[in-house]
Structure formats: C-alpha cells, structure tokens
Image: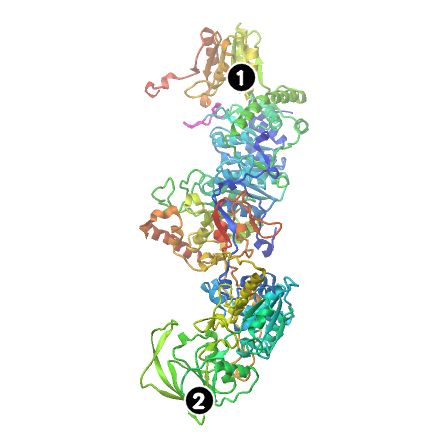
Amino acid sequence: MEKLPLGLVIDLNQVVPYKTGSWRTLMPVNIMQVPPCTHACPAGNDIRGFLRVLAEKEDYEEAWHVLARTNPLPATCGRVCPHPCEAGCNRRDFDSSVAINCSERRVGDYGLEHNLEHKKLVSGRKEKIAVVGSGPAGLSCAFHLAKRGFKVKIFEAYGEPGGWMRYGIPPYRLPNYILKQEIDNILRLGIDLECNVKVGVNIPLDQLTREYNAVFLGVGAQKGLGIDVPGKDADNVYTGVDFLKQVNSGKWMEIGKDVVVIGGGNTAMDCARVSKRLGANVSVVYRRTRMEMPAITAEIDEAMEERIMFRYHTNPVKLVTDEGRVVGIFSIQMELKEPDASGRARPVPITGSEAFIPADTVIMATGQAVDYDGIDVQTVDNQWMYTNEHLMTSMEGVFAGGDAVAGLETVALAIGQGTQAASAIEDYIEGNVESNLAQPPVVYSRDLNTYYYNKQKQFNKEAVSIHTRLKNFREIYPSFDLKDIIEESKRCFSCGLCFHCGNCYMYCPDSAVKISPSTGGYEFDLDFCKGCGLCAKECPCHYIQLTLEK
Amino acid sequence: MEQSAEELNKIEKKDLFTSGHRACGGCGQALAARLVADASGENTIACVATGCLEVFSSPYPDPSWRIPFLHSLFENAAAVASGVEAAYKALNKGPVNIIAQGGDGSTADIGFQCMSGMFERGHNVLYVCYDNEAYMNTGVQRSSFTPLGARTSTTPMGNKTRKKNMPLLAADHGIPYVATATVDDFRDLQRKVKTALSIEGPKYIHILAPCPLGWGHHGELSVQICRLAKDTGIFPIYEIVDGKVTNVLKIPVKVPVEEYLKLQGRFKHLFKKGQPTPEVAEIQEIANQNIARFNL
Amino acid sequence: MLKQIEGSRAVAECVAMCRPNVISAYPITPQTHIVEDLAMIVGQGKLDAEFINVESEFAAASVVLGASAAGARAYSATSSQGLLLMCEVIYCIAGMRLPIVLTCANRAISAPLSIWNDQQDSMAMRDAGWIQLHAEDNQEASDLHIQAFKIAEQTSLPVMVCMDGFILTHAYEPVDIPEPKQVDDFLPPFLPKNIVDPRSPKGIGLFADPRFYLETRYILHRAMEKSEETIKEVSADFAKTFGRNSGGFIKTYKLEDADLVIVSMGSVVGTIKELIDRMEEEGKKVGLVQICSYRPFPRHEIYNVLKDKMNIVVLEKSISLGRGGILASDVRWSFPRAEKKDRNISSFIAGLGGRNIPMDDLRYMVEKVEKEPVELEFLGLKNELISEKDL
C-alpha cells in the first residue's frame, strides 16, 4: 500500500477514481425504438432518419437516399399520400405534427432535380422475376428485387407505366413528369419494361410462371363499378375509373355544363375536380355525410374550396334520359340509421323526398374491382386476391400486393406491400424460412420529455389561388423552399433515437456518460453509473431507458 | 476579464469534478458542483466547507476534484478562501478563480459569519451555496434554509418557519454580483458562474440542489423538481448586479405549488387523503409573494 | 540594537522581520498591541504583507490556514477566549501540517471574565498538535518568534509562542532587536511543501475513513516528538547567529547541588530565580528547571536533569479542573514508574486570573515542600472568600 502523504495531501492528477458502478440496481441502456410516424407509414419509411439528416446535416442528398431505401417514389408519395405518419406524429400532442409529407416531397424533388440514382445492393443474380403491373406495388417490388440483383421484367397493360398513379391521379395532384422521372429512375436499376401487354389476355399467366422464377401481381383495382339504376348505360354516363383514365390519357372530354359525380371516395373527388377544370358545374352526390366519406380529408377540403357542390344524404334513384343521353338524375334524400357491416351509418330513404338534379354528364365513382381477366387465382369474397402471410397467392410462386390484395388503398400501402413481396420472393427463391423478428416498441407521446422541445409553427404549404388553379391541370402546390423544409425538419422530436441533445451527458451527476471516441455518440460508463435514472428521465426522446441490472 | 456573450453561454464539460464520488444517485449537489467546477475552468481553487459535498467528494485517497481543493472545517470556507486570496495577492500570484462553496448550513447558519466577513472585506472570491434545504450529511436536520412545512429529522411535524432569504442578505452586503440558479438549467447556471468570475470582488451564487434522500424523491426527478421549484415561484431565478435585481426568469406557465410538493416525501404529510392541509395554502402564499416581489 | 520597548512592540518588530505574507487577527477577546503594531508596520509599507482584519478569531485562524495552504508565510496572534474560539481551526491547522506561527499572549479564560494573565488558554490547546514554546521574558519572546517560523517550516508543524499577557506583553524592558539582515540570513524564505495551485492541482484537507485516521494521528504524534531535534538545532543556530541563548527544550538554574528543584515556565521564572539567589545567600540549595518547549514535552530532558533530585515542586499558572496541576502531571509522568517511589513531586497552582505571585508566597512554597510533599495547593488562596457550601 501507498505510504500516507504529508498532511494527507494528494496530487489530483494521480487519483485513480473509486468505482461506484457496483451500487447500481438499474442500468441505463440506449434503445433505438420505432417512431410512431414510421409505425404508421404503410411503406415503412425511415421518416425520423431523413428528417434528422436534414436537421443535423442539411444534406438533401443523404436524406433522399434514406427515403429511397424503402420508397422509390418519394416525390410521388410526397404529393399523393394521405400521410398517416403525420397523424401518428407525437408532435401532434405538443403543437402540430411535423409536415412530413411536404418534407418528403421536397426531398423527392431534390432527388429528381439532381438526378440522384438508386444504388444496387447486390448484382448479377440469375433468377428472373416477372412483375405484372407498374403501379406503386409493382414498381416497389421490382425496385427492391432489382436492388438485390434479380433480373426483373415488368409487364404493363397500358401504354405508359405508373398504373393508377399515371391514369387515375390527375396531374394537378401528381404531374406526369414527376412520376415519369421517378419511374425512369427505378428502371435504371436494369429493370425491363414491356407496355401494352395485358397478362392473362395478351400473354397467359402460366407462361410467366414457367419462364420466371416468380411472378408478382400488382394489377390494382381498375375496373370501375357503377350503381345499378335505370339509365346507367346512357352514353354520357361514365365510371370514375374510365373517366379519369380517358382524361389522364390526354383525351378531351365533352362533359357539358352540369356534371354529377356519384360517390364519396378519392376517385369521386378526382372526377369532380377534373370536371371542374374542364369547365363544368359539379355536384357530388353522396348517400351519407362528409363524416363517412372515405376520401382523403384534404381532397374534400380542396374540392370544396374549388366550389364543388356536395349533396349529402342523397341517393340517385334513376338517371333521367332523353334520346339515349342522361339529362339529370332523380334522387331521394336519405337518413342515417344504425351502422352497417362497413361500420358506417346505414342510409335509409325518406319517402317523398325525391328531387331532380340536371346533368350533362354523370360519373359513377362508386366502387372499383380487380380485373381478373385471365388471372385465375383464389379470391376473398369474390373481391380481392387471396394471399398468405408472405403475400403468395393460391398459385405457387405467384405473389400479389397493392390494391388488388388490400382493396382501395394508398400508394404508400402498395409500396409497402411491394417491398414486403420482394423480400418474400427472395426468401422463396433462396428457400429461406422467413423469420418474424420482434419489432422494437413504438414511442408514444407519454414516453417523451417534451420540456426540451420548443413550440414552433408547422410548415404550411401554400396552394395557388382557386382562380388560377381551376384554369389548368397544373399542380396546385408549387415547390417548397429548401430552407423552409430544413427548418421544418428541426421540429422532428426524433422519437426513440438520440439526437445528441447532450442532456444525459450534462445531467449525469456521476459524469458516467461519456462521448464515445469511435462513434462520437454518448455511451454509459458502467464503472461509475449509479443507475439513478436522471439520464433516462431527462432524455427527451426516450432513447435512454432503465433496465434491471444484469 | 470581459467575456463575450458567446463565451458566457457556452456549455462547459471538462469533468474537473468527476466520477467516483460517493453521492447518492441523482444527487443535485454533485451535479451542481460539477457544473460549477467546469464553468470555472482549470484555473480555479475550490475551498469547500465540510458537508455532504466534501464528504462524498474528497475521501482519501480518491477525491473527485481535478482542480485544487482545500477543505478544513464546516463553517470557515469563506474565511479560508479569504486567506487563499490574500496569499495570492501577497505573493503576487494569479489571477486565479477562488470559489468558496458549501451547503445551506455552512452558508446560512454556522458559516454565515465567515461569509459575511468575506463579503464585507471585499475579497475577490465567488461564494457558491448548494442549497438542499437541510443538513443532509448528518441525517436531514433542519437548517435556516428548510422551507415551511418540510419534514426533517428535527422537525418531524413539519418545519414551522420560513426559509432565510440568503441571496438578498448577500446582496445587502453591497457586493457586485448575486445570482440564483438551479441544476436543471445548466447553461444558465454556468453562465452565471462565468459572469461572477469575470467580476472583481465578492460574489454570491445560490444554487438549488435537490437531495433525493432528504427530500424524499427518486434521484431521476432531481432535475424535474428544480423546474417545478421555478415554475411554481418557490425558487425565483434572478441576478442582482450592483444592487439591482435583473434578468428575472419569467415563469412561462405558473404551476400550483402542489405539483412541486407532491413529488417530495418531505411534504407528504401536507396532503391528508390526497387533500391539501392549510399549510399548502400558506406555501402557495409564499410562492405568490415571490411572484409579486420579483414579477416572475 | 538594544531598545527600551514594550513587549508587544518587540514581538511585532521581530515578526515583521520574518516577513510573513499574510497576517490576520481579531482585536477584542482580548488582543495585545502586537497586531496593532504589525498593522502599522504594514500600513507604513515597511512590511509587504496582507493584513486581514476579520470578524472573529475563528476567521483569523481560518484566514491564516487558507493563506498557508496557498503558500504564504502566515501569522496571527490571540489569547484567552480568542484562542478558545480558534480551537477548531487550531486542531485543523496541525492536522493539515501547515507551518503557521501564532502568538498566544497567555491570559485567563471565562467565566468569570478576566483579562489578566495565566496560562489556562494555551494549556487548553496543548493536545492539538502545535509546538508550544514559552518565553521567560520579552527578549526570549522576541527571539522565539524568529525561531518559531524556522521550526514550523522545517517540521511542517504549527508553532504557538506563549508569552504571559500583560506581564510581558505590556511591559517595557530592554530588548535586543536584531537587524533585518541577520534575520534574513537566519530564516530562509518559505518553501511550502503542498499548496493549492492550479498548475499542479492538489487535494488538501481530505476526509480519512477508519482505515487511515489512526495512522495520521500516529504520524502527527511522532512528528511532534521528533521536532525536539529541530527545536534544539534552531535554538543552537540562533545562539550562533545572534550570540545569545533563547528557546531550546529546557533551561536550568543552579541545579547542580540543589536539594530542592522548582519546575516552572513563563515569566514567573524570573521571580523564582531571584528567590533562588536569595535562598542561596541564606544557605539553602534550591534549583530551577525552566521549561521552554511545553509541547513537545521535554520528558527525557527532565528525567536526565532531575533523576537524582528527590524533592521537586512544580509551579504553574494553569489547572486541569478536577484533576490538578497539568505541568505537575507531565513532570510526574517523566519518571519511570520504579523511580517515582521515594521522589516527592509537589504541585502548586498560582497566579490564576492575574493574581500576583509575590516572593513571600514562593518562599512559603519552598519551605513547605522542604518539610513535606504537597499533592496540590493553590498558592495565595484567600480562604476567607470561600464558602464551604459552594464546593
């Protein structure tokens, strides 16, 4: 043992610190968790990841690559996605959610403006996969498979790729050039595309199953369904699908002065707004109320802004025709009773409430179905395709995803299923048994210490005036400023992942939080940590948690 | 030593008071001592009074200080610091930051005389009081900083007196700088230490440093409790520069004192079956007076 | 240079020549002219030092503690209640091995309040780990301060120079005040061992748990014992430089053939010497052992000079209440158990609270112990003032 120094005076530079780690019963750990935005995103986008890159590095290129890991269509999704991520955003309980959708759009656009390219993870695999349909599901599946080195060929029934995004969504929401660029970028991974080939009609499905190691069906739900009322077969009656397809194919439609759109979904909104841009007075006729409308809220809002008339509780009884053309509809008022099987209030007619609504064109956006022509797979309730948990249909080696499987859903969901199918196809080809790893827990508002966040207004995208926007089919939201989006990204709470606020480092009374020389991140020095939990409590984003000492 | 606003606002982490001390988990005083030492920097001498801080941070052979540390007794940190300052003057050494520091007992009770003497004589010393509102090292006995209602081992039925207002007493010595701070806002705390050290003459900084053991809260709440002490008006944050109260921290949203009291075991007896006893209203009144007095 | 000078002034001038860097004192309980004179010397610019007027003796001791720990040669002076108020710091200074020099102008302690001389104050500090040197007269008091700094700094032990209050401090006597140059040659500049300095951070005043505390006390005790050599060396050195004997461990007077030996310390020694001379004329052989270093206690010296003397009387100006003479007890302890048997060591307490010790009383004491040993007696006690019921 050391001799006692004179007066017990010690050279402080020579002190070997006493280790207090043994006092600990609880131990802090860094646990990366799933933020609610990603949890809510059907495409599984790393939203926190790309926002942190923007906030910390202001690096749009890296942010684009973060997004493109899961989603090859950020500029598209940034325009058309109803962004459930924002509904999930923990910031909503604090002031308002982060404008994730706008941020995604700006990052996607940046990628296009700067010709950023996807990177292959693996190359040179021999196996071939046929993808049927070039909508979001097909593109996503093809994208992920191509990145993993498979030889992919897409068969598209129409003249141009994009599926419903190309032929359904009107250009004022999603300009064609944006979609085209994103698709071209995907195809640049070496994906073959053959258009105007309708699988099941022009080429039998079993030919694909023979020639390819696997097939993915991303055929969508592009058969428009009308309602069965007298007069439905008149010339100037369209299904929503047909109407949009024709307009989006560049065909000029003579629709007259008054247009009645029947339905309350997104297709109905698109039809109504397109008709408005074609110069008509538009009424939307819907059996229930706005509350029950399945369309995206923003779409309804924008439609209303554009002075489209909404007739709620209104049900068409018959289409009044004159010389084979509809001149108007007879409708009856409905009242809402107890919910039906869909969970929505059941509309019941009120006797004697019939009314006549004049119409030069009637568009029935009242439902869509899968076109099973030549595709003989098992279905669920005669409606959507059946798949097992790996998205494989009843046919061996044939996988499916998107609207054909999930029903009328979002682009993001289709992308998510395409991604999932790509993994499933890889596992199928490689003979892997897919393991279901436990997902990390999701961080919710109650887990956060929001003291450290400042209230800040959400980025607000500005639409062009109604007057201007109704004159053409141009996008109604002009591009956003890069700086504004950087500012917006700084509002991200970074739920469940360290954003280097330094609280743990500064607050640890034992200086037991150190900066890792290798990663530059914070790490716990368990030789000294007493497990008091101050770091976890003051961690704004719930990245630090206490666990039982091992 | 004029410093730019940027330097004053810079957060310092140098671990000049570091790991290995024997404080309880979540100790507010250990945290405060590190923030103060790091803000003062290497060119500093710490003259520490006997007390929790000294006992947990300076056992032979492994003290936690990395700046020169001098301790002798409970009540004389200010006088010892005066002596150190006099020696540096006499020997023409320096400049050096000299910081006398102690708990509330060694500041406001037994050490009050030495501190008052140091202020009055005008030594160029910063006195830092780590206020944990009782004699914690010896088993949580009442001090003149123990607030109304708080239960300590010598006020088992709750303290009947109000807390001594040390910052104002210090300021009335006519010293150039007085400030209050809490450990939750380390930037503010360190700025005040740096500001104080840039001023010639005696300075006083009063830091609220929660004691999990004595206050009866879990260590993880030490920072949150400070925040509530501020937001209730119980512990006003301000500076007194040349006798003028300034930089008063406004309370963004005023919180009832219950929120603060309920987190701490020492105030548990003030709530019978969840209902506040009349003392709570009295404590609220103290907070209200602070709010009115400092325009919080 | 020989000067007719007040004791306090002489001490102040000698202390100033030792060039302390920091002086701190408190005036009231009670103080001597020493610090007033030093304040003047500093004020006139004759000494480059910080003079800190504090709010209590406690603070004065704390200030010199801090100053010493920061590398300054530090000095204070006090007495009586002031010393008692310093008590906590006094112990601390020794434990921290800080070479501080302090003058104790010995005076009585309360209650009742008395401002006059005895030695109960320094006696109360005898176990603190300070070297205590007692001066016989103002010349020795002055000389001892010069020696004290040297002893303190060589041993890393604090030194308390004790001189009887009023009797010495306020008395005008001729004192040979040395030249500053002589003092500078004798006393090298202070080279502190451990100081608080950011350039080499040290921890001073650490907490010792039961694994270490016992050893620190043992070390301090042994250091006190070992300081004997330094005290003797410095005294011898002083004699060489200044040409007179001052300090050291003990001094003897007409001891050789003495039948009876008085042991005492402080200014009363002067009166005792006079008595011895007178009694010598009367044919009585009385000797004196004068204790200069009370702590460390010169046990072996006393044994060596007194081992053949069978009749010893200890005269002291202090008392351990409920026990008796403190010095007497120390002297009795100086003899091995076997040699105590037939040796008479009497104990007399005198002069408490400034009571005069007249020659007659001393003569009475000598004559009494010639006849029989006295366990304990208060010299000059006025029995007529004492009510039996209060005892």
Percent x, y of residue C232: 62, 20
Q: Amino acid at mark 2?
A: Ala
Is mark 2 in CB contact (under 8 Å) with mark 1? Answer: no
How many labels, in total? Answer: 2
Q: Nearer the viewer, residue A517 or C116?
A: A517
- The coloring applied to the image is rainbow
In the image, residue A147 above or below residue B50: below
Percent x, y of residue C146: 61, 26
Q: Is residue B122 left or right of residue A341?
A: right
> Does label 1 lie on the same chain as label 2?
no
Q: Nearer the viewer, residue A18 or B197?
A: A18
Q: Which residues are magenta?
A: C109-121
In the image, residue B247 above or below residue C189: below
Circle 2 marks a residue in which chain? A
Query: Label 1 neighbourhood size at 10 Å, few (<14), some (14-19), many (20+)?
Result: many
In the image, residue B8 above or below residue A457: above
Q: Is residue B165 shown in magenta?
A: no
Q: Secondary structure at mark 1?
A: helix
| Quadrant (top left, top right, bottom left, bottom right) of the N terminus of chain A | top right
Secondary structure mostly taken by the magenta-highlighted segment of the chain? loop
Q: Secondary structure at mark 2?
A: loop
- Would you identify the image quadrant in which residue C270 lies? top right
Residue A17: assigned label: none
Percent x, y of residue B36: 54, 47
Q: Nearer the viewer, residue C15 or C229?
A: C229
- Seen at 63% across and 62% down, the residue is A121
Q: Nearer the viewer, mark 2 or mark 1?
A: 2
- Would you identify the image quadrant in which residue A146 lies? bottom right
Residue that numbered label 1 is attached to: C269
Residue that numbered label 2 is attached to: A359
